[in-house]
Image: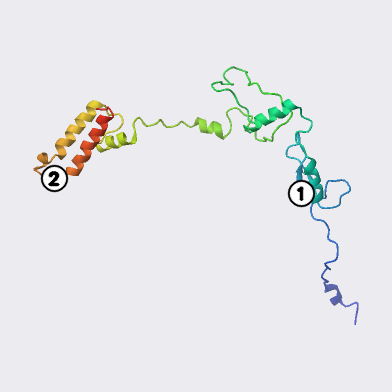
């Protein structure tokens, strides 16, 4: 057997399962730990959006002792809990326009925490989806109920019709579809019945 043969260079050996594998990903942030840090843990207040990387054992120990409110007094904790109800968004009293006075800014309590708002949507005045929704003009509500609107439609009228227009239209339609005006033809009786019913509805609503 020729050990210098180029065939030996192309031989590949499958690695053994007992061989130790290199840890994938970042290492655990606990000093002295060599396990991979596969689990994220928040660093705490004033460091929102930043995380430690721990292994399973150390992330459990960290979570067991984690306290977001550590170092805050009772008043600050109560203020945080109150603002949590509205998602820590700035609010104003009903009917108060904070931008009505030049240079006036709404009073905001002093807090020792913050939230991540890279686009400035929550702090901006007149910005965000809520402002765009308010900018859209809402359609005016209908003047009359659905039966009244339907009755007006049967008579061929709209909501702007007054009492005189309703009476005149009713008389004209009755004369047009009454059997006596059609040589005794009763094929328009259903139409005439709808017209009379619509007129009764409008009269009951006080429109004629």
The spot of residue 41 in percent (x, y) is 76, 44
Residue visible at 85% across and 73% down? Answer: 9
Report whether residue 55 is seen: no
Can residue 62 be seen in the rendering of this structure?
Answer: yes
Q: Is residue 31 left or right of residue 69?
A: right
The image shows residue 161 at horizontal and vertical percentages of 27, 29
Give the crowd class for mark 2: few <14, some 14-19, many >=20 residues within 10 Å. few
Q: Nearer the viewer, residue 115 or 136?
A: 115
Looking at the image, residue 16 sits to the left or right of residue 78; the answer is right
**Residue drawn at (78%, 43%) of the image:** 64
Q: Which residue is mark 2?
A: 186
Instruction: Locate residue 157: give its quadrant.
Output: top left
Left or right, 108 with reference to 181: right
Identify the residue at image location x=17%, y=43%: 189
Mark 2 or mark 1: name the one nearer the start of the chain: 1
Dot 1 falls on a residue whose secondary structure is: strand
Percent x, y of residue 128: 58, 33
Is 186 situated above or below 197? below
C-alpha separation, residue under disc 2 versus residue under disc 1: 84 Å
Q: Which residue is mark 1?
A: 39
């Amino acid at each position: 057997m020729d050990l210098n043969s180029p065939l030996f260079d192309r031989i590949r050996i499958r690695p053994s399962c007992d061989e130790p594998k290199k840890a994938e990903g970042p290492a655990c942030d606990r000093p002295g730990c060599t396990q991979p840090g596969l689990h994220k843990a928040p660093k705490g207040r004033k460091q929102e959006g930043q995380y430690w990387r721990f292994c399973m054992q150390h992330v459990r120990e960290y979570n067991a002792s984690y306290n977001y409110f550590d170092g805050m007094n009772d008043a600050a904790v109560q203020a945080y809990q109150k603002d949590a109800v509205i998602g820590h968004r700035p609010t104003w009293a009903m009917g108060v326009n904070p931008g009505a006075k030049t240079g006036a800014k709404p009073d905001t309590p002093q807090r020792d925490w913050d939230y991540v708002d890279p686009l400035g949507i929550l702090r901006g005045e007149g910005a965000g989806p809520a402002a765009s929704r308010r900018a859209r003009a809402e359609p005016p509500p209908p003047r009359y109920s659905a039966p009244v609107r339907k009755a007006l439609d049967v008579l061929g009228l709209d909501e702007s019709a007054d009492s005189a227009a309703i009476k005149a239209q009713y008389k004209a339609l009755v004369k047009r579809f009454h059997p006596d005006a059609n040589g005794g033809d009763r094929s328009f009786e259903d139409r005439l019945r709808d017209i009379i019913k619509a007129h009764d509805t409008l009269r009951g609503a006080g429109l004629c």
